[in-house]
Image (cartoon, grey):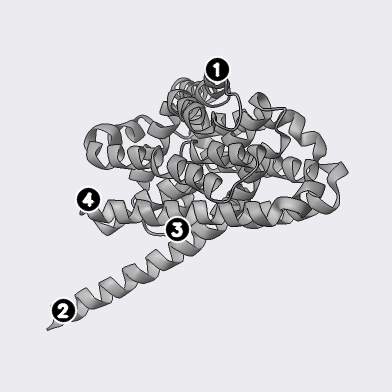
Amino acid sequence: MEQVKKLCNFMSSNIAVFIIIFSVIAFFCPGGFAWATNYTTIFLGVAMFGMGLTIRAEDFRIVFTRPKELFAGCVLQYTVMPLTAFVLAKLFHLPADLALGVILVGCCPGGTASNVITYVAGGDVPLSVGMTIVSTIAAPLCTPVLVYLLAGSWVSVSLVTMMMSVVKVVLVPVLAGILIYRIFPKQINAIRELLPLVSVVAIVMIISGIVASNAEKILTCGALVMIVVAIHNVVGLLLGTGAAKALKLDEKKVTAIGIEVGMQNSGLAISLATANFAANPLATLPGAIFSVWHNISGTIYAGIRNRRKSVNENVNCEAAEL
């Protein structure tokens, strides 16, 4: 059992590596993964259910003990990333499919990967978990409304249909997971260490399926999407960090907010594009590329924040000695 736990921790900490490996395999052997696109909604629902199983009552206490930080993080989440996506779509004159995909990513809540990266970066993990929970619960309203307002100039958006999609693939599985944990806490705690593996496998399959289905199209527009996605993510990380500093929060909270703002639930963006915009097949591509990139950039950001933390601690120690 201990070996299985180590494997789960290893896969969760190195999800970006597994995404890259399976994406490359899917690109060159699309026949083995293209089938996964038919089950995108199911895979995401499984990942969200796994997230719900890990949420405990004490995780909700963060809402009441740190309302300022939570409110700031969620407001930044649903303003910085959506508006940046809209500006980039206009600036790069993206075609409708890609513009929609980028905006979908920008309008999604924070992803669970942000919690792992925050831990690696030495940030405030409870705050990160709290922001992910709150932004996810708010997603059935915030995400469809923002997509409707920002993507409406490119494609026709059905607000009610999108709301129902988010409810089905995010809210219902998360609440079901929370309920199951409340009913069977001992049993769930016994397998808690294994739950991240479920989300890792689900996300890897979602992205591999999208890459396999769009292998030829990636050759023609993959570079453009990569540039836009990278800029989008980096702007989110920087503005999230800058805004948190402007609020004069401590460094751990700054790290948590910066990561939460910059890292999105791109699996949801892929699922929404698949379920609601079948006429725009390339709309899934930005989400797939974002899933790979934000784990890489998040790890780099974590390294930078850790080095900064070490420098500050050394300076403080030297000052104390004087």
> Which residue appears at 71% of the width and 41% of the height?
205
Find residue 284 and report its horizontal and vertical position in percent. 67, 38
Q: Which sits earlier in the primary sequence, circle 1 or circle 4?
A: 1
- How far, Cα to Cα, is label 2 from label 4? 25 Å
**Type of amino acid at the residue the image marks with label 4:** Leu
Mark 3, Cα crowd under 10 Å, few <14 / some 14-19 / many 20+, is some
Task: Out of 318 and 139, give the one closest to the viewer.
Answer: 139
Find residue 301 and report its horizontal and vertical position in percent. 45, 62
Find residue 184 and report its horizontal and vertical position in percent. 49, 23
- How far, Cα to Cα, is label 1 from label 2? 57 Å
Task: Out of 77 and 186, give the one closest to the viewer.
Answer: 77
9 sits left or right of 62 in the view: right
Residue bearing mark 4: 247
Callout 4: SS: loop
Residue bearing mark 3: 120
Q: Which sits earlier in the primary sequence, circle 3 or circle 1?
A: 3
140 sits left or right of 220 in the view: left
- How far, Cα to Cα, is label 4 from label 3? 23 Å
